[in-house]
Image: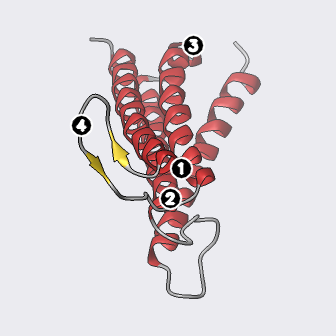
Amino acid sequence: MDDIKKSQRLLVGHGALVLLYAFIVGFGFLFFLIGDIRLWPIPWVIDYQMPGTYDAWRMAHMEGITNGFGLWLMAAVLPLLNFSAKTSRRLAIGMIITAWTIVIASTIDPLFPNARGIALTSESNLMNDIAFLLFVVGIGIVVVIMIKVASHCLLKSE
């Protein structure tokens, strides 16, 4: 199999896993909205209000969807970028790391109080700091990748 095709398949596979993760988080969002845990037609109801806020659950759910589709989009355009197989593989792995760090960091917010991950905290909030560091890793990698892609495509003459 062509090496770029391997990278594409890796991106598509992880994109599917990230989307599945988003679907699972979507159930958490649903349970938060209805105020208990139930799945029709299963007759049991667990009287438990999921923690978090509407915005936190919506963001966690949407981050999974957008990052999963982002991996699929990268898989689709990868051959157009005309990078070497080695560079394509590095881009794929970087995008996969980005997707997973961002969706995991986004899921921390609705599950733990005051853990948005927007900044490191001076008080002892380990989950917030973990979310922040995950965001820093993911965003740092994707910025480097987008600079690489943009400069390669816009500055390189054929």
Give the amino acid type for the residue marked by disc 3 in the picture: Leu
Q: Which mark is residue 57?
A: 1
Q: Are marks 2 and 4 in contact (CB under 8 Å)?
A: no
The residue at the point 39 percent across, 22 percent down is 12
Q: In the depicted view, which residue is nearer to us: 35 or 151?
A: 35
Q: Are marks 1 and 4 in contact (CB under 8 Å)?
A: no
Q: Is residue 68 left or right of residue 77?
A: left
Which residue is disc 2 drawn over? 110
Category of crowding for the residue at label 3, using alpha-carbon neighbours closer than 10 angstroms: few (below 14), some (14–19), many (at least 20):
few
Colouring scheme applied when the structure was drawn: secondary structure
- Disc 2 or disc 3, which is closer to the eye? 2
Residue 152 in sight: yes
The residue most toward the front is: 43
Residue 23 x/y as whole percent: 41, 34
Q: Earlier in the sequence, mark 1 or mark 4?
A: 4
The residue at the point 64 percent across, 71 percent down is 119
Residue 131 x/y as whole percent: 50, 63
Disc 1 secondary structure class:
helix
Residue 141 x/y as whole percent: 55, 48
CA distance for labels 2 and 3 = 38 Å
CA distance for labels 4 and 3 = 51 Å
Q: Are marks 2 and 1 in contact (CB under 8 Å)?
A: yes
Q: Which mark is residue 43?
A: 4
